[in-house]
Each structure stands twice: as structure tokens, then as C-alpha cells.
Amino acid sequence: MMQIFDVAGKVIPGTLVSAGPITVLATKKTGEKGNKYDSIIVGYGERRVKNINKPQREMIKKALTGQEQGFAVLKEFNNKKGTLPEAAVGQTIDVSAFAEGDKVVVSAITKGKGFQGVVKRHGFHGGRRSHGQKHSEREPGSIGAGGKQRVMPGMRMAGRMGGDLMTFKNLLIAGVDKENNQLFIKGAIPGRKGTLVEIIAK
């Protein structure tokens, strides 16, 4: 995260995202080869060709007219609602598809925090620090259900925290750097440095 200043000198906090170019590798149309929906498959990043399985390698080779190139990530975008623009196989899409002031939908995996207690995971206050309370500062307290003699589903307890797919809507693009393929998105984005982020124009 960082901050920039707009024309009026107002500070805008946000996240700098490296949005390298993606390549359209295949398109699916409803009814063709048994497809039940429209979609496009894109590739992002770099990977050695020998580390890609044969079906993906053949698809990449066909899309790039015989040139074998490895992609670190392959992603299929469903176009059931018809919101995706028309794209040709082999076409490259970069940050120029976005403009300053656009609203986007961002999805990413949050930071994994491991096994955590109820105080950190759910914001519990813990036990009282009064006389007779020796080691109850971070305990969850009673989990009884009042006669049902079992723990009810959905009870907030200790457990693994983070590592969830989170989606944030209506985030504002505050800056576009076409030379370095970077987007400046206002606000925070889930994940750590290096997390793969999905950005879709609203």
C-alpha cells in the first residue's frame, strides 16, 4: 500500500497492483463442442514449458500460432451474463483497458494467520480480571446451549483464520501506469505481497 496526491493536493491511500498483460488463449461459445456457456481462457505470468501439462501446452501452442510459451496461471472467465468484451484468440490485454475513475471488482485470497483463538479471530473480550479469575483472560467462556446438550452449529470458536477468498466491489482506480503495467486502486486489497489478484471492470 502507498498513497498519492491528486490535482487538488488531497491524499488518496491505496494499493499498487502489478497488472501485467494477459493473453487470450481460447474462447468458448454456447453450443460449440458441447459448451453450455460463453467464456474466455487467458494466461498470465511466465513458466517453463516443460512444467506445463500437455493439454495446456497444446492450447497455448495453437493460440500463439505454433509458438510455445509458458504461462504461470491459466484462468477461465465465465461470460454467462454477457459482460465480457469480445476478444480474439492471441489478443493481449493490458492496463490500457482501464481508465482513471473506473469502478472495479477485486477478488483475492486473504493472508493466512494459522490457528487463532477467539479473541483475535472473533474479537471476544475474554474473561474477567477479577478475584478468582486466574487464567481466563483469553478464554471463550461458556458454549452451553441451555438444555440441548450439544454445541450448536455456527458457534464462534477458535480455529484457522485467514486464507479465504474475499471480493470487494466498487473499488476506484485512482491511477494507471501504462509504461510499468501498474494500477493504483483506492483502498486496501486482500492478500500479501505477491498474491494473485483478479480485477474485473464493473
Image (cartoon, rainbow, N blue to C red):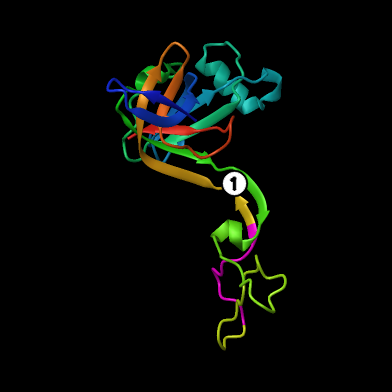
At x 53%, y 17%, the residue is: 62
At x 62%, y 22%, the residue is: 57
Q: Quadrant of the C terminus?
A: top left
Q: How many marks?
A: 1
Residue 104: quarter of image: top left
Q: Position of residue 188 (x, y in %)?
A: 46, 37
Up the image or down, 101 lies above or below 79; here it is: above
Local secondary structure at mark 1? loop
Q: Position of residue 87 (x, y in %)?
A: 37, 22
Judging depth in this view, the residue of 58 and 194 nearest the camera is 194
The secondary structure that most of the magenta stretch takes on is loop
> Which residue in the structure is indicated by mark 1?
163
Does the magenta run of residues contain 153? yes
Work out whether residue 182 can be spotted.
Answer: yes
At x 59%, y 22%, the residue is: 71
Q: Amino acid at mark 1?
A: Gly
At x 65%, y 67%, the residue is: 137
Q: How packed is label 1: few (under 14 Cα within 10 Å), some, or many (20 or more)?
A: some
- Say whether residue 8 is left or right of residue 91: left
Q: Position of residue 88 (x, y in %)?
A: 39, 19
Does the magenta run of residues contain 202? no
Judging depth in this view, the residue of 132 and 195 nearest the camera is 132
**Which residue is outermost to the bottom?**
147
Up the image or down, 29 lies above or below 96; here it is: below
Q: Position of residue 179 (x, y in %)?
A: 44, 10
- Say whether residue 73 is left or right of residue 101: right
Write down the region rendered in magenta. 150-159
Residue 80: quarter of image: top left
- Say whether residue 7 is left or right of residue 2: left
**Which residue is outermost to the front?**
131
